[in-house]
Image: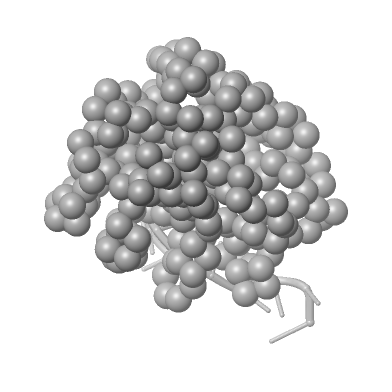
Amino acid sequence: MWKVVTWNVNSINARIDRLLAFLQREVPDVVLLQELKCEQVKFPQAAIEQAGYHAAVFGQKTYNGVAILARSAISEVSQGFADGDLDEARFILGTVNGIRVASAYIPNGQAVGAEKYHYKLRWLERLRAQLATKVNMAERFVLGGDFNVAPEDKDVHDPKAWEGQILCSTPEREALKRAFDLGLGDTFRLHNQDGGHYSWWDYRMLGFQKNKGLRIDFLMATAPLLGCCTGARIDRDERKGAGPSDHAPVIAEFKL
DNA sequence: ATGGCTACGATCCGTAGA
């Protein structure tokens, strides 16, 4: 069994105790992290190593930051896109157990029409270009991330209220689909077609307690991995208790 | 009562998240 996780931890240093407990509880083979919110020098390397994990980090002060954790060695690591823009730490690619893996933190976009919204749409096109040129979609590859897009209305607690809004607008959904159409399938949707399953809940307004959430975090996989994906789930319990991230981990298992 | 948060880097509030 090969277990992979994607998780936006909303600051790895604020979440380190929860992350270590999660690693001990789930014993994943690969963890794709987003929103480290720290530079590499502030990354809790020793604690991660002591937990039995290698780490490949693309850090940034205060914002963004992505990493790959793995129980096996991580090789062929590249940070950012091949188009040379390293302004924001949002994408890291590597190889674990002979399988290509990547962690992506898609820009939030702030509001439809805002400058950050156009940056988000451009970034999604650059992600598509990166995947098209740097990843062989005929081979085993898994892309985990906080995509900051709810692909369908059933991924939204109140589709009417969110219609056309940031994270749900048609241009965002289409840009995301163009990237996934290269050959990536959603491991969660492979096993569960129901609505009402979310990976993020607003800290405000009792969002979690009222299950007012969005499903915006996914583990996407190419056909050779989808064919051996035995299960996928959202670890909703990780959102409970004191000091959670606003995102829950998404977990998928593969029989290699 | 229809709002209720969290983290960061710098203060004792502004920015950002989604």
- Front residue of A103 and A16: A103
Q: Is residue A197 left or right of residue A102?
A: right
- Front residue of B4 and A227: A227
Disc count in the image? 0
Asked if residue A255 is positioned above or below residue B7 in the image, the reply reads: above
**Colouring:** one colour
Q: Is residue A175 left or right of residue A142?
A: right
Asked if residue A74 is positioned above or below residue A208 in the image, the reply reads: above
Asked if residue A182 is positioned above or below residue A205 in the image, the reply reads: above
Q: Is residue A28 left or right of residue A147?
A: left
- Front residue of A116 and A237: A237
Q: Is residue A148 left or right of residue A137?
A: right
Evaluate whether residue A22 shows in this view: yes
Which residue is rendered at x = 53% and y = 24% of the image?
A: A127
Question: x, y (%) of residue A11?
Answer: 38, 53
Farthest residue to the right: give it.
Answer: A160
Evaluate whether residue A143 shows in this view: no
Question: x, y (%) of residue A184?
Answer: 56, 30
Which residue is rendered at x = 64% and y = 59% of the image?
A: A197
Question: x, y (%) of residue A228?
Answer: 47, 40
Quarter of the figure that contains the C terminus of chain A: top left
Report which quarter residue A139 is drawn in: top left
Report which quarter residue A238 is drawn in: bottom left
Which residue is rendered at x = 78% and y = 58% of the image?
A: A158
Question: x, y (%) of residue A235?
Answer: 49, 62
